[in-house]
Amino acid sequence: MKRAFAAATVVLCAALVLTTFAFARSRVAAVAVTAGKPSEFRFTLSKQSVPKGPVTFAVTNRGKLGHDFKIAGKKTLLLARGKRSTLKVTFNRTGRFPYLCTVPGHAAAGMKGTLVVK
Ligand SMILES: [Cu+2]
């Protein structure tokens, strides 16, 4: 009886550890990106830094003009006012990653920034 209980405890602990590990591995960082805020040619990001690994950017255009969001060689479609899109990027290394809006003139007007991956 004592033995069965000990075995059950071991199995339970193992299951708990595995579940926790699986959960940690599947965790994807999420960053909310707002284009056109605080002004037309600016971005607001909910996080300035993310851990290395997969990141989902939820991009919303709150400006009046069309904007997109590009980072690490990936970008969203051109988003009309009020539209939203999701961009999934996996960062395999740490460092500073510049982001910008690729509509001509927008980045030069200030629509750019840097995300830190650590
Ligand atoms: Cu733009």
Image: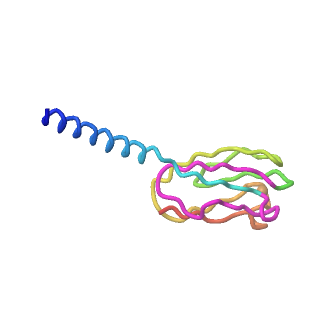
The quarter of the displayed image where residue 116 is located: bottom right
Foreground of the two, 84 or 91: 84
Measuring 76% from the left and 66% from the top, which residue is drawn there? 108
Q: Quadrant of ligand 1?
A: bottom right
Residue 66 placement (x, y as % from top left): 82, 50
Q: Is residue 5 left or right of residue 96?
A: left
Which span of residues is magenta-colored?
Answer: 36-62
* Front residue of this view, candidates 107 and 44: 44
Q: Residue at x 51, y 61 (%)?
A: 117
Find residue 62 and report its horizontal and vertical position in percent: 80, 54
User: Measured from the top left, where is residue 37 in percent x and y?
Assistant: 77, 61
As rendered, which of 62 and 98 lies closer to the eye? 62
Instruction: Tell me the quarter of the picture where residue 111 sits.
Output: bottom right
Residue 116 versus residue 11 in the image, above or below: below
- Give the residue furthest to the front: 1
Residue 101, percent from left and from top: 72, 57
Q: Quadrant of the N terminus?
A: top left
The residue drawn where x is 65% and y is 54% is 32
Task: Look at the image and say whether residue 28 sits in the magenta stretch.
Answer: no
- The question of residue 57 being in magenta is answered with yes
